[in-house]
Image: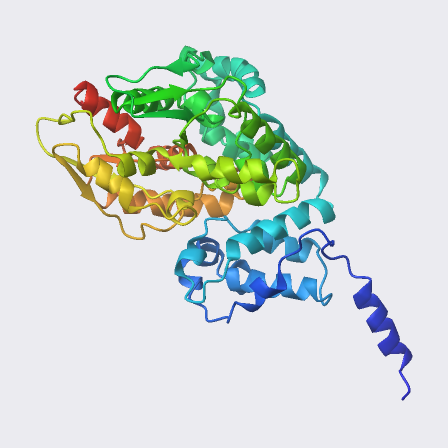
Amino acid sequence: MQVSEDSTNNTASIKNLKGFDASHPPDPKLIDSCVHCGFCLSTCPSYRVIGKEMDSPRGRIYLMDAINEGEIALNTATVEHFDSCLGCLACVSTCPSGVQYDKLISATRHQVERNYPRTLSDKLVRQLIFSLFPNPDILRILLIPLFFYQKSGISQVIRATGLLKKISPRLAAMESILPKITIKTFQDNLPTIIPAQGKKRYRVGMILGCVQRLFFSPVNEATVRVLTANGCEVVIPKSQGCCAALPEHQGQTEQAKALAKQMIDSFADTDVDYVIINAAGCGHTLKEYGHILEDDAEYREKAKNFAAKVKDAQEFLATVGLTAKLSPLKDKPLNLVYQDACHLLHGQKISVQPRQILKQIPGVQIKEPLDAALCCGSAGVYNMLQPEVAEELGKQKVTNLLNTGAELIASPNPGCALQITKHLELQGKKMGVMHPMELLDYSIRGIKLT
């Protein structure tokens, strides 16, 4: 049998296509479990906004398979579709075939970061993000000039003129979600050990988070008060750093592993019953430490044991029960809407527990929004890297929350809270956004909402 020269050249070109390396590419068995039924399409936020097949879970799985088979390359044309994924995992919840898309997109993103050369501007933006946000001590230093930037009124001028958006939409997106910086932002007043009130039921560790500890320190303080009021001794190791959520979600393999090891080491000798986290995105990653460090002989078992102790604050309280007395937050019934954070709802399968806890507060009535499972567009750093899609999703989310007629939004994730607050302001609406732990804290302390 004779083989033509063109056929030989085509075969050679296919073999030379730049693809995935041999270190944990997307698993063909997981890829084959997708029957391409299309149930994921209606729940995928990127597909709903962009409207292209390749920007859906099903489409991305086609691409993963083709790259695995050497039929197409890992290049700009394919990477843009992987980048458009929010990683919200709504498709995982809705898939009738049980496709583990979370494992597929995670493996793909780590491959992309190792094997795809990004443009200089993309590299610089990502380097800025991954140098700052997982390093709260460095970020706190940057907040000094940003504090004066806000105080001087320059920020209002920049936003009004839209100048930054013309220069760099991504930098404009970062600036647009920047919360108000106060003197409290620079403080870190929580002690290492806080005793339980009354009889001690549990000894728990608590993770402070990065964005949470800087911009939402009242949430951490409220969480400590709620835990201690319900019989928990709280341990907060000072050596803890970032949980690794941001670098892990964006394929920064070595940084994610290093941060995970640091977190495990910081709790190594604390002898805690559980490790509590009050940020949804962080919690999902903390529970994945066994997967992140599965190739590390020294930390493999440590990671599994650590992950087994991790509990979302609402999940934990719903399980062990509240012992502290709860008081009404208003003199009349309070209508609030609970916003499901994706990595709590889809990643950790936690949805009922937060509602159970909030309903125990006297007078609280929970409203349910349309499209409750749809991502708000924050998705870690997605709203900074893909601002156009994130803008549309943020607008939809806030419209749906407002349409419930609720007076208050309960949001269990700092990124979601920033995104929702931004879009409330853009729509000219005044509506409070509070973490469920803050509401519980107010109720325990008898503080009324104004």
> Looking at the rendering, which quadrant does residue 134 occupy?
top right
Residue 294 appears in the rendering: yes
The answer to whether 426 is drawn above or below residue 30 in the figure is: above
Relative image position of residue 246 (x, y in whole percent): 55, 36
> Looking at the rendering, which quadrant does residue 338 occupy?
top left
The answer to whether 302 is drawn above or below residue 325 in the figure is: below
Relative image position of residue 4 (x, y in whole percent): 89, 82
Does residue 392 appear to the left or right of 448 in the view shown? right
Please identify the residue farthest to the bottom as the structure is shown.
1
Residue 52 appears in the rendering: no
In this orientation, which residue lies closer to the viewer: 447 or 49? 447
The total of numbered circles placed on residues is: 0
Does residue 52 appear to the left or right of 45 in the view shown? right
Relative image position of residue 238 (x, y in whole percent): 51, 17
**What colour scheme has been applied to the protein in the rendered image?**
rainbow
Does residue 218 appear to the left or right of 304 in the view shown? left
Please identify the residue farthest to the left as the structure is shown.
332
Which of the image's four quarters has the C terminus? top left
Which of the image's four quarters has the N terminus? bottom right
Relative image position of residue 413 (x, y in whole percent): 39, 35
> Residue shown at 39%/36% (left/top)?
311
Does residue 228 appear to the left or right of 125 in the view shown? left
> Residue shown at 67%/33% (left/top)?
124
> Residue shown at 59%/37% (left/top)?
247
